[in-house]
Amino acid sequence: MKHIPNFITSLNLVSGFIAIILAANGNLVAASWFVLAAMIFDFLDGFSARLLKAYSDIGKELDSLADVVSFGVAPALIIYHLLSNSLSVIVFPENTTDTILLILIMLIPAIMPVCGAIRLAIFNLDSTQATTFRGLPIPANALAVISIVIASHYSQSAISISIIGSPIFLIIFTIILSLLMVSRIPLLSLKVKNLKLKGNEGRYILIGLVIISYLIFGITAIPFVIPIYILSSLLSLLF
């Protein structure tokens, strides 16, 4: 029984690895769904560890290693492909200008897994992040990335498609997400101890705003989830 959480964490890692393979082959939508599957396994491993009281130092380290792959490397590779497509840069350029551009396209997404790894290292050593987070959690980073892919694919919204086709947006988007992960901004933990309003104000604001956004915009509202999460976290400081 004590190995069940680690097995589920391994499924997180497997999902992230498959997402990387799919993203490397340009299938960004399928890669996004496997990143989402990794998120589900990431939730279930913690839930099972609490349920079975099967905590271990190995499990903690394995979870972080899996998260770097699934929520750091895989989303960064998705960003790399979006940037490459938006700038129409080939893998083996024939002139110096395209070579420099290709290097930049590789280096900018690389910021994401680096900041994600730093964020996880800080989290593992910071005992104050039990009830609130400091900085954007790395799964939230991954959700932000896959949300723009899924929204543009399934909604076929002209705005969504133009956004993921804009290199300026993708570069700014990547840098902001990366910096948020290593920031010290207080953000909500979604671990709920009770359903009382007191102490859960930010979480109820988050749920309410997400539901309203979905009712208004449909699947196009998915990219709003992380901004709403940050806004709800900041509003919760007022209570």
Image (tube, helix red, strand yellow):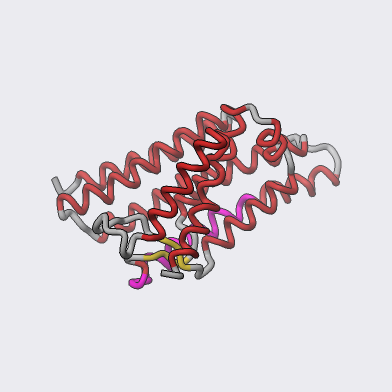
Residue at 49% over, 42% down:
212
Q: How many marks?
A: 0
Residue at 78% over, 47% down:
101
- In this rendering, would 48 be left or right of 14? left
- The answer to whether residue 119 is above or below residue 146 is below
- In this rendering, would 43 be left or right of 182? left
- Image spot of residue 134 (x, y percent): 45, 67
Residue at 28% over, 42% down:
8
The verdict on residue 115 being magenta is: yes
- In this rendering, would 34 be left or right of 40? right
The verdict on residue 53 being magenta is: no
- Image spot of residue 63 (x, y percent): 34, 52
Locate the C terminus by quadrant: bottom left
- The answer to whether residue 73 is above or below residue 132 is above
- The answer to whether residue 24 is above or below residue 109 is above
Image: magenta residue range: 109-128
The image quadrant that residue 122 belongs to is bottom left
